[in-house]
């Protein structure tokens, strides 16, 4: 796979590139899009070939017999994550934001509190609020550039109105891969406060060398309240397929979720199922290994540049392709460092406050793009903050 190939995505209905100028004011012709969490790479050939077979056949009717699709998910989870999944546990949703929204709809009621460890993926708070539930922000501790969980503080915050915890593992935007002990503490917290635990593990395949991700489903004494969310979309850069899996071991929770799925009349997109079935394969696994090696070098280059600029600090990335950069040390207010990134460097990056408490001095940069573009972004950021050096 040639990850160095520059693919021009402008003018292709691409949110990441075509909405950069209207949202951030970064020029479409000269700007670098580093905000939306998709990659600027083509998916593996095995996915492209599966789609080509569909095109060659030329009839796009309703999808039937999902046995190969379910078997592919089972194979991937067991071989890549050591987790045995029963096919009857699997629901397919319209992506994982939809999956999280369906969990909120199925397992909570209006006015309930839904707990987030912030800063965290911004869509969670948006869908919680839109569903007329209360966002309960439990701010993580930034311990010298590493996020940690303070359960004594979180216990004190609970009022008894909370019914769900949406947990991000690995963490977006900080890139933390949680330890088994931390995961056990999360599970114990959920049990203490009788919370349904929704574990969003969409980034679980994108883990860098030296770190191991553990599926929450492998933690003891959590199965009766656990909902696992996984997908091919981040791993293989097929987010436009809008397919994700909500995997529920507990029969009571599963029945509640199935009832809501049926009531909403939801069924998956055939293109997404075909792509996922092809991706979860030995060929797909080999591609992911190559991808991680490439992203690892991008990470080293980006972090080395950022950390050499006085006042800037890139949080050590254990997973994801989303660099979380702290500008607090510059002494600048948010408008000033944001202006330098967007106007001087012409880079579109996510604003930290959208991720909740603790994100105020940060911006998130997507480094899943050809190396030449990462290097150009590094040069621009170095120049934009040259007066600090």
Image: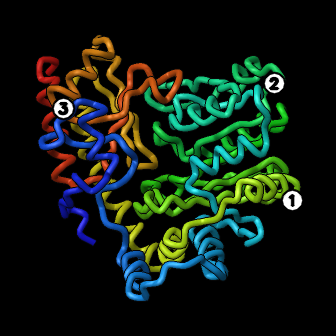
Checking the image for residue 15, the label placed there is: none
Apparent side of residue 307 relative to residue 95 in the rendered image (left or right): left
How far apart marks 3 and 2 lie (CA) works out to 45 Å
Earlier in the chain: of badge 2 and badge 1, it is: 2
Quarter in which the N terminus is drawn: bottom left
- Among numbered discs 1 and 3, the one appearing first in the sequence: 1
Left or right of 98 in this view: 84: right
**Picture quadrant where residue 34 is located:** top left
**Residue toward you, 290 or 277:** 277
Give the residue pinned by disc 2. 161
The residue tagged with tag 3: helix, strand or loop? helix
Outermost residue, bottom direction?
A: 57
Q: Which residue is mark 1?
A: 251
Vertical comparison of 80 with 338: above or below: below
Residue drawn at x 41%, y 67% as measured from the top left: 288
The residue under the point 68% across, 51% down is 216
Quarter of the image with the C terminus in it: top left
Taking depth in this image into account, of 198 and 152 the one nearest to the observer is: 198
| For residue 80, above or below residue 15 | below
Q: Residue at x 65, y 67 (%)?
A: 82
Residue 353 position by quadrant: top left
Q: Which residue is mark 3?
A: 381
Q: Position of residue 209 (x, y in %)?
A: 43, 56
Q: Residue at x 37, y 35 (%)?
A: 364
Q: Secondary structure at mark 1?
A: helix
Marks 1 and 3, Cα distance to the nearest angstrom? 51 Å
Q: Marks 1 and 3: which is nearer the front?
A: 1
Q: Position of residue 33 (x, y in %)?
A: 26, 43
Picture coordinates of residue 133 (x, y %)? 70, 29
Gap in angstroms between the C-alphas marked 2 and 1: 24 Å
State the SS at label 2: loop
Q: Count the numbered circles shown.
A: 3
């Amino acid at each position: 796979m040639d990850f160095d190939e520059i693919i021009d995505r402008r003018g292709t209905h691409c949110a990441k590139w075509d909405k950069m100028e209207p949202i951030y004011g970064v020029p479409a012709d000269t700007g670098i899009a580093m905000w939306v969490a998709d990659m600027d790479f083509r998916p593996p050939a095995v996915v492209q070939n599966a789609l080509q077979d569909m095109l060659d056949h030329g009839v796009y009717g309703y999808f039937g017999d999902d046995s190969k699709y379910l078997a592919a998910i089972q194979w991937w989870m067991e071989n890549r994550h050591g987790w045995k999944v029963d096919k009857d546990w699997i629901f397919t949703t319209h992506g994982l934001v939809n999956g999280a929204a369906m969990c909120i709809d199925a397992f909570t009621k209006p006015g309930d509190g839904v707990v987030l460890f912030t800063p965290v993926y911004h869509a969670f708070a948006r869908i919680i609020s839109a569903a007329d539930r209360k966002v309960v922000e439990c701010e993580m501790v930034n311990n010298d550039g590493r996020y940690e969980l303070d359960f004594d503080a979180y216990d004190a915050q609970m009022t008894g109105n909370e019914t769900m915890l949406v947990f991000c593992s690995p963490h977006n935007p900080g890139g933390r891969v949680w330890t088994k002990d931390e995961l056990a503490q999360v599970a114990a917290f959920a049990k203490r406060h009788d919370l349904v635990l929704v574990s969003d593990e969409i980034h679980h395949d994108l883990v860098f060398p030296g770190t191991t991700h553990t599926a929450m489903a492998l933690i003891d004494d959590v199965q009766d309240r656990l909902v696992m969310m996984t997908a091919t979309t981040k791993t293989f850069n097929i987010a436009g397929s809008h397919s994700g899996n909500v995997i529920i071991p507990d029969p009571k929770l599963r029945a509640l979720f199935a009832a809501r799925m049926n009531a909403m009349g939801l069924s998956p997109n055939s293109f997404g199922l075909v792509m996922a079935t092809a991706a979860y394969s030995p060929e797909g696994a080999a591609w992911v290994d190559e991808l991680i090696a490439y992203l690892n070098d991008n990470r080293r280059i980006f972090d080395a540049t950022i950390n050499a600029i006085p006042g800037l600090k890139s949080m050590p990335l254990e997973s994801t392709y989303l660099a979380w950069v702290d500008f607090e040390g510059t002494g600048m207010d948010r408008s000033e460092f944001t202006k330098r990134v967007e106007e001087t460097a012409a880079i579109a990056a996510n604003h930290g406050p959208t991720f909740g408490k603790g994100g105020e001095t940060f911006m998130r940069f997507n480094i899943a793009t050809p190396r030449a573009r990462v290097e150009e972004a590094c040069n621009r950021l170095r120049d934009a903050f040259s007066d600090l050096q």
